[in-house]
Each structure stands twice: as structure tokens, then as C-alpha cells.
Image (cartoon, rainbow, N blue to C red):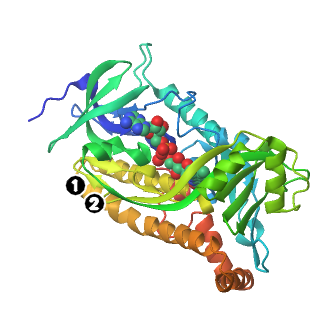
Amino acid sequence: MSEKNTDNHFDLIIIGGGLAGASLACALQDISLQDNTSQQRKLKIAVVEAFEINADAQPSYDDRTVALSYGSRCIFESMGLWSSLQPYAEAINTIHISDRGHFGVTRLTSEQEGVEALGYVLENRNIGQQLYATINANANTNTNKAQNISLFCPAKIVALQQNEEIVTVDISANGKLLQLSGNLLVAADGNNSQVMQLLNIGSSRKSYQQSALITNITPGKKHENVAYERFTETGPLAFLPMTENRCSVVWTLTPEQADYHYALDENEFLEQLQQRFGFRLGQFKKVGKRQIYPLFLQAATQMVHDRVAIIGNAAHSVHPVAGQGFNLALRDVASLAELIVDALRDGKDIGSTSLLEQYVALREDDIKRVYRFTDVLVKTFSNSITPVAHMRSLGLLMVDVIPDAKHQLAIQSMGLGGRLSRLNRGLPL
Ligand SMILES: Cc1cc2nc3c(=O)[nH]c(=O)nc-3n(C[C@H](O)[C@H](O)[C@H](O)COP(=O)(O)OP(=O)(O)OC[C@H]3O[C@@H](n4cnc5c(N)ncnc54)[C@H](O)[C@@H]3O)c2cc1C
């Protein structure tokens, strides 16, 4: 029988406090359980994060934006976080999908779908600040108040052992070695997951031989809350409406083209972008900082191990073409949080094999659907061969005239396909 040092024993250990890991901690911050002396207490959570929230090297809360689907807004709303995120969110009321130089166009609107907005655009940094405001409000500080979240940051996992009863991790925090134990460990440490390496869990990775050049621009005209997805010969080009009438730009290019455009001076860059996008948004005025991300499809060979569940980018990374990555991660969070709460209510072990199997079963279809959806979009819309270009124009036209096809596309974009978790349906955990 393993010994539990109560100070360093947690119900849940989350490795990686990025968008997915921090969201899970926030979802579970208020959950109570009965301990073995029949006292009610809050779930004890440890979050181990490698970088301070405001550090330049912080890889999750950087200059990118996230197009949050309507379904993700519901999840944050059920978690009680939407009111603090909303001031930083710009609504997407229309999605305009077109093919540069070809005839097909389709438009999805919030009005047709009967929702307030199809989605929302937020800067990753702002989401991080709000998630950490919640975590810090619940985190152990030097006060005497008993808080239920312990944040170890900057800290990294260095070793991991599992047995039938607990999972133990050695972490290096501020130069000191510490040992934590938990009933369940969640790997939310991104697509170079060290937890997966320590457990010998592999992943398949397919490079798209494309890079995303991201930035934001100020257009000459009002964006009117329209998101543009334009398919060009080099790949998709997305303009998403942001606060202060800015547009977030995700420009998919070959790695060489991305480097070339990155190195251009501001005026040359704006000229090239304008040429690619056209004048629907008027003359582009200002451009923000540019960054490049290599694009790939990555899938973990397994999403669970003894007392370990894998969520977010560690489990799956997809092309940002349809803005699905974090939305998919948040649905991992919502499903896993629901299983944890149900197990606690029934007095069951949250690290049990049966809970982990249920997690895999719940997430399988959604993940496969998003892989297919993004992969097909990238393949079809990064192809300049004429018959393929005609087919996709026809495809866009068909989607535009067949109401159900359009509705299905909207449902997928809004993150409302398949079985929905309680949080996704606007219900509390
Ligand atoms: C260009 C681009 C645009 C995108 N646009 C969208 C979009 O519009 N909509 C959308 O839904 N998604 C989008 N995504 C995807 C989205 O960014 C990811 O899905 C999201 O970042 C996944 O979050 P995560 O927390 O799983 O992983 P990450 O963001 O990678 O976070 C991992 C965290 O773990 C920490 N960490 C790593 N190793 C360790 C360790 N050993 N110990 C402790 N901590 C560790 C890291 O510091 C980090 O904080 C986009 C992605 C890209 C590249």
C-alpha cells in the first residue's frame, strides 16, 4: 500500500496550465466531495505549469487569437467564466467562405442558426489572464485561508510512477525537487507532451508542409462582425473580427513563403496581403506583430494510461483552418470534468480504469469528426489543380443552396455536433 503524504497528495494533478489545463482547473474549482471522515471539502487540485503566465516564452497565452465556437461559449458560461471573458470577445455573426478567383461562395449567419453569434474571437493572452485570475483566487498563497488549488509555476515534471492506487510525479519547481501524488493525473502539456514521453505513449504526426503566418491588421472599413475564410492557391486565408475594429489574420503559406512574408517591411506586407484578400474590408492600414507556426495533424496513439488522461493538444493537434483546436480541447475538458464529478457523487475513484475508458469512449467520435473535417478542408482547399478548383466552387455553391448542408456546416463550426456534455448544454456540472 502506498503512503499518501496529505500535504502533497491531490485528488487531481494537471500537468500543463495552458488553455486546456487551466480550463479544467477552473471547471472543477468549486467541486466538493466527502472525505473519509465524512467531512465535506473541495477537490484538491495541483496545476504544474512550465512558464509564468506573462513570460514571453509562454506558448499557450501568446499573440494568437482563438475563434471560440458558440458551443465553447456555452461551456465557459456553465463554468461561470463567460462574464469575465465577454469584455474581450468580438462576436462572429457571419462566416463568409469563398474561393479566390473562382465562383463559389457560402455564408453562414447567426440569424439563420437562431443564435446570438456563431462564435467569438478572443486573444489567447486575455483568456489566460481570466483563467489565471480564477485559479489564483483559489490558489494556495501564504495566507492562512485553506485554498483548494496549488499552482506550481514555473515548474516541470521530471519523473512519473503509477501504481494501482496513486500516481506520483517528481517536479522541479523553482530549482527545488518536489514529489506530488494524486488519484488522477491529466496531461495537458501540449504537443511535445513530456508526460506522454515518460509513459512511452507515441503519436502519429502528419506535416501539411504549410505554416500559418499570424498577425492582426486594422482594415479601412468596419469588419461588421464577419469572419472571412478565403481559399487561395497556397492554402486558406482567414480574417476574423476582433475588438477595436481589428482583424486577426491566419495566412496559410508554404514554409518558404511564410518566411518571405515575415521578413517584409510593414508596407510591403500589407500590400501583399491586400492583393491576396482584395478590398472587401477597404484599404488595410496597420499591421501588428507577425508570428509563424508549422502546421500538422497529430494524434496520440492512446488517450489514457493507468491513472492518466490526456487532453487538448497533447492528445490531438489539428490545422487551424476552421478554428477547431481549442474548441475540441474544451470539449475534452467538459467531458472529463463531468465524469470526475459523477464519480465523486457516487463515491467512486476518479482515477479508475472504468472512468478512463468512459472518457475515451465519449471523446472518440468528436475527435475523429474534427480530424476529418479539418483534413478534408485543407486537402481540398490547398489544391490549385483546375478540376479540383471547379469541384470545390461547386461544393461551396451547393452548401449555399442546400439549407441542411449549410446547417450541418454551421453545427460543426459552432461546436454543437454529436453527443454534448452537460457544460456544453448550458447545465452545471
Ligand atoms: C496559428 C494557430 C491558430 C489557432 N487558432 C485557433 C482557433 O481559432 N480556434 C481554436 O479553437 N483553436 C485554435 N488553435 C489551436 C489552439 O491554439 C490549441 O488547440 C490550444 O493552444 C491547445 O491548448 P493546450 O492547453 O492543449 O496546449 P498548449 O496551448 O500547447 O499548452 C500547453 C501548456 O503546457 C505547458 N507545458 C508544456 N510542457 C510542460 C511540462 N513538461 N511541465 C509543465 N508544463 C508544461 C506549456 O507551457 C503550456 O502552457 C490555433 C493554433 C494555431 C497554431
212 in relation to 31, above or below: below
Residue depicted at x 85% and y 62% = 278
Element under label 1?
A: helix
The residue singled out by tag 1 in the image is: 353
Q: Give coordinates of residue 427: x percent, y percent.
A: 52, 54
Q: Specify the quadrant of the image occupied by residue 45.
A: top left
Q: Give coordinates of residue 204: x percent, y percent.
A: 37, 60
Residue type at tag 2: Glu
Q: Is residue 73 visible?
A: no
Left or right: where 230 falls relative to 347? right
Q: Most extreme residue toward the left, as rendered?
A: 1
Q: Give coordinates of residue 395: x percent, y percent.
A: 67, 83
Q: Is residue 131 visible?
A: yes
Residue type at tag 1: Thr
Tally of numbered tags: 2
Image disc number at residue 295: none
377 in relation to 333, above or below: below
Residue depicted at x 63% and y 70% = 382
Few, some or many residues within 10 Å of mark 1 (<14, 14–19, 20+): some
Image disc number at residue 357: 2
Q: CA distance from mark 1 to mark 2?
A: 6 Å
Left or right: where 200 falls relative to 215? left
Residue depicted at x 22% and y 31% = 37
317 in relation to 54, above or below: below
